[in-house]
Image: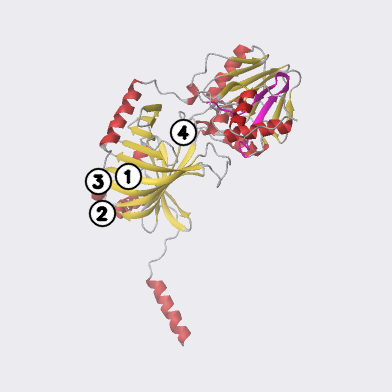
Amino acid sequence: MRILVVAIVYCLAAACATPRAVERTARPGDARRWVTAGITAMGGKAQLAKLARVRIEAVGHEYQLEQSERVEAPQFLGGYLRVVEVHDLAQVSAVRITSDLSEPDADSRSWDVTRGDQALIAQDTAKEPQLIRARFGRPLAVKLAPEAVLLTAAAARDLAAVDDTNIQGVVHHAVTFSVDSMRVRLTLDAATFLPATVELVTAEPDNVFWSPWGDVTVRLTYANWRHLDDSAWYPMQWDEWRNGMPLRTRLLTRVVPGGTLTADEATRLERLEQGARTGPPVRTIDAMPLEPTVSQLAAGVVQLPGRWNVGVVVQDDGIVVLDAPLSSGYSARVLDKIQALFPGKPVKAVVTTSTAYPHFGGLREYVARGIPVYAADVNTAIVERLVRAPHRLTPDALARAPRALQLTPVRGRLTVGHGRNALELIPIRRESGDRMLIVHIPGAHLLYASDLVQRAPNGAFPGPDLLEDLHAVVTHEQLAVDRAFGFHVGETPWGDIEHELRRLGRAPLGRG
């Protein structure tokens, strides 16, 4: 009898409970109804209007996907940040001020500013602001912010519902709409109707980190909703993912409806924008200029200087290029310059020594021309991923005429070519640059050191750990080296590197 009573009570409780949403196929009218329900859930249009301008203060972390020692989660390099954002929906304006909590200069801030279709990125210190680059505007930063995304969706003429989706075991309704010629997918929790995810595919042809990847899938998630005093509901955690990898998390500490920049922030911003108005025009990465000079390092060995240098080695049967930085368009101009320097000499191979995004971002142009690629065995997966990356929004030569990748993994010391300029490709296999290759040119006693040797304008060597590991590999492999060069350094006497290691108390071992 007791078991029967318990069963009856359980059944009654289940029958009275609100039924849990289940996934279903979208029907006409769902999209408008769901978006309207979402606006109501956030507090209604009157409450959202109080957030037409809003100041947000947050802390968070950001992963350096483009620089990481590992190219897959979870071991990305990262940093902790303090962030201020001010959104103004009426002006389609967004200002993000980021302070790196690990930065020695506590007053150093980076700025990411959108004003309609104009934008800039700048580095600002207490002493002097420095414009890093102006770039194409990103009004989506405003229109897809939590306080605006439902209003943006409601105003879209092509708003449409799509089938429900399950996110972490919870059913979500989904709608799509266009904004600024881009298709956006928005999901709303089927129980609360609050926005959960915003996803779109975009391209950033002027961004040294993301230009190589062409069509980039951006996914924003909004969570930990709180009811602001005398205003709408608002998410206190934002996460951004790119191409399926976590990029940044923001934990909001303060949300000020109607808030704006402080007087000091506004003054600094005006100074930065003035510099942008009088500065050089916006360039895509493809259009970045090559340096007019060429550094002759040895007979048949030259370096093309630039923001990222390129090495060129002439062998009897063709040319080997050391690294393909930045973008397909940039590589096309590098190859044009090589042809002008060595007319009639074919490019037989390209060696990619590092997979930081700017370091190998131009490989697709070589693949498009049928040029074989050499890469460290641990980097074959990311090279293949770069070659497969869709470029529909900004098509390059490989997107217009697909071609198979010819890739040789370098698992150990490997000789390429013969004669005076034969090359030896050697994996680092140490903590510093463990995914990198170095390239030894025995006939010239030259070493291409990838990214392991850098030099400040005053001659100092940043990164002594890099030098120490590089010297250990040179010693272990018994390489004859008189000079080094690399991504960010020109011809450098090997004795300078040894002297620096001794000065730091990291005396290099003998070469025997």
Label 1 environment density (alpha carbons within 10 Å; few <14, some 14–19, many ≥20): some
Kindly check if marks 2 and 1 are in contact, taking CB atoms under 8 A apart as contact.
no
Q: Earlier in the sequence, mark 2 or mark 3?
A: 3
The mark lying in front, picked from 4 and 1, is 1
x and y percent of residue 286 in the render?
50, 24
The secondary element bearing badge 4 is classed as loop
Q: Amino acid at mark 4?
A: Ala
Kindly check if marks 4 and 2 are in contact, taking CB atoms under 8 A apart as contact.
no
Q: Nearer the viewer, residue 476 or 377?
A: 476
Task: Kindly report the distance in space between the C-alpha atoms of the residues bearing marks 3 and 4.
Answer: 31 Å
Q: Amino acid at mark 2?
A: Asp
Q: Earlier in the sequence, mark 4 or mark 1?
A: 1
Residue corresponding to mark 4: 203
Task: Name the disc covering residue 229, or none.
Answer: 2
x and y percent of residue 156 in the render?
34, 41
x and y percent of residue 318 in the render?
70, 18
Q: Residue at x 28, y 35 (%)?
A: 264
Residue corresponding to mark 1: 56
Q: Nearer the viewer, residue 227 or 475?
A: 475
The secondary element bearing badge 3 is classed as helix
Kindly check if marks 3 and 4 are in contact, taking CB atoms under 8 A apart as contact.
no
